[in-house]
Image (cartoon, rainbow, N blue to C red):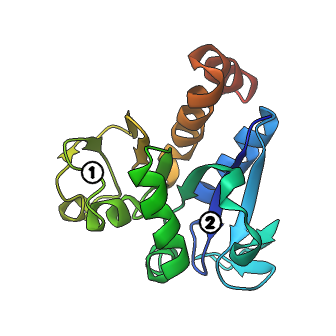
Amino acid sequence: MMKDICVFFGTGYEEIEALTVVDILRRAGIPTKMVSITGEDMVTGSHNISVKMDAKFEEIDFEQVEMIVLPGGMPGTKNLEAHEGLMAKLDEFYAAGKPISAICAAPSIFGHRDMLQGKKACCYPSFEEDLKGAEVVFDSCVVTDNVTTARGMGAAIDFALAILARYQGKEAAKEMADKIIY
């Protein structure tokens, strides 16, 4: 059985970036958890939309986590990066070669942690200088080895489909794109 993909929510997350990943992966039957880093069951996004989480960070068994997904948004990205427990797990995943994904401003976290050396990466405009060591590209979404990055809200479907393709193949991602009229 496949382990969970965990999407981490801090106050001020970008709603569409986070929820598009959850929606598309769940449609595909991939176990996906919305995880609060705030200690609260409800987390409010950057556009004042509150969502009930599946779990709190402290409740997650990271042995059962397949991938860490970081949505962007402000101050959501800063709140994710300020969470020491999450950053420790992100470092462990990266060191072990496990999949990590980030969209919008959140790929800057990977750059700050030296996770993009020699990799192609993209992010929200104006955060490119934070992608330390990366070959910065301007594709909507790019996958290099275990790292997936995307540019922003308008790239949320590409981002979610790239994650889906990692686990179920490009054909399944194309079928999903067709089903959602993308």
- Label 2 sits on what residue type? Phe
Residue drawn 48% across and 54% down? Answer: 93
Neighbour tally class for label 2: few under 14, some 14-19, many 20 plus, Cα within 10 Å? many
Note whether 88 is above or below 4 in the view shown: below
The Cα–Cα distance between marks 1 and 2, rounded to whole angstroms, is 20 Å
Q: Nearer the viewer, residue 44 or 83?
A: 83
Could one spot residue 24 in this view of the protein? yes
For residue 157, which numbered disc appears in the image? none
Say which element carries label 1. loop
| Quadrant of the image occupied by residue 143 | top left
CB contact under 8 Å: marks 1 and 2: no
Position of the N terminus by quadrant: top right
Q: In this view, does 133 lie to the left or right of 3?
A: left
| Quadrant of the image occupied by residue 124 | bottom left
Could one spot residue 73 in this view of the protein? no
For residue 116, which numbered disc appears in the image? 1
For residue 8, which numbered disc appears in the image? 2
Note whether 11 is above or below 4 in the view shown: below
Say which element carries label 2. strand
Position of the C terminus by quadrant: top right
Q: Which of marks 1 and 2 is nearer the N terminus?
A: 2
Residue drawn 72% across and 40% down? Answer: 25
Whole-percent x and y of residue 61?
Answer: 72, 62
Residue lying farthest to the top in this orientation: 171
Residue drawn 49% across and 45% down? Answer: 98
Whole-percent x and y of residue 152?
Answer: 45, 54
Note whether 74 is above or below 72 in the view shown: below
Note whether 1 is above or below 37 in the view shown: above
Q: Nearer the viewer, residue 53 or 123?
A: 53
Neighbour tally class for label 1: few under 14, some 14-19, many 20 plus, Cα within 10 Å? many
| Quadrant of the image occupied by residue 118 | top left
Residue drawn 56% across and 55% down? Answer: 69
